[in-house]
Image (cartoon, rainbow, N blue to C red):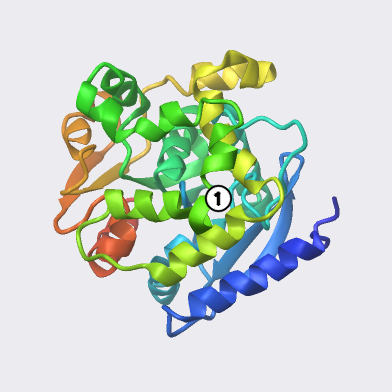
Amino acid sequence: MNVDTINVSHIHLALTMHTRIHAYTSTMTMTMNTINANGLTFAYLEEGHGPLVLMLHGFPDTAHTWSHQMTSLAAAGYRVIAPFLRGYPPTDIPHNGYYDKATLVRDVAALIGALNEGEPVYLVGQDWGAITAYGVVAAYPELVRRAVVMAVPHPAEVNKSLLLPKHVQRSFHWWFFQLPNLPEKALPENDFAFIDYLWDYWTTPGHCDEAHIASIKDMLKQPGALAATLGYYRAMFDVQKMDPRLDDVRRAMERTIETPTLALCGADDLRAELMTDQGQYFTGEYHFELVPGAGHFLHREQPEQVTQLVIDWLGKTGT
């Protein structure tokens, strides 16, 4: 697909999402662009000029999740790019494509090559974006100056949590999404009420993000989008859904991390207890900080505090 072409329905989606977002951000100066990387056309939001900060979203979410941080980082002198991950319109939905973690890591490495000529970037990720970021800094440390991971522990800690009942309950959707066909039928019911439930369950009481959640639902209503986003979870446990050509990347993702990394988690997120003692996975500079008054979507629940923590970390001397 040519870098300048994108599905007409995806253009309509992008315009709709921008309209939704306008309701909760007063200074929208970012642009929507596309680029080819790793065999797909990725759509991305961009704002500012300077060293590149690449921001990766999670589920259920879109690149617009970073609206608060992008404007502030741009004002601080950074070029900020937030791509829509594979399968999340307006980015391509790959036909018979892979959604395993190694594939996501390769996507980001390819995006860095395409967007920054392979020069190292600052990398920020939340939820699935954090899972991907852990893999990128382990497998491709030369591509990342400094990293920030939010709301998800190191993959080794995630694996340990599978034996802890309360964390299995917290991540009940992982198991539900393994079922064939049923999630595709259940999630759209009552205008994607399941998405409202997840955001309510994972955020602090009283947090309201209606316009943003509505834009997520708009994305999921696009043909093929729901199955694609579920594909991330189905590739977690099924080796048949993992790209067999990327075994070398998987091995590299198991390395200890030398990239200076800041880990953030909302103090009200159950996963915080899994992130307090994961320094053993890092040989480079590592720091963990709890964000009071926040749950899983800490960057939206406490945007000013999280943004300042990110800016301070990226701007540390010696980098």
Q: What element carries label 1?
A: loop
Please name the residue shown 20% across and 42% down the image. 288
Residue found at the far bottom of this picture: 26
Q: Residue 275, position in %: x, y?
A: 22, 35
Q: Is residue 118 visible?
A: no
215 over 97 or under it: above or below:
below
Q: Residue 192, position in %: x, y?
A: 50, 54
Please name the residue shown 59% across and 17% down the image. 248
Q: Residue 91, position in %: x, y?
A: 68, 53
- In which image quadrant can residue 13 be found? bottom right
Q: Residue 254, position in %: x, y?
A: 43, 19
- In which image quadrant can residue 9 be found? bottom right
Residue 301 horizontal side relative to residue 23, left or right = left
Residue 65 horizontal side relative to residue 113, left or right = left
Amino acid tagged 1: Pro
Residue 161 horizontal side relative to residue 224, left or right = left
Q: Can residue 193 be seen in this view?
A: yes
Q: Mark 1 points at which residue?
A: 188
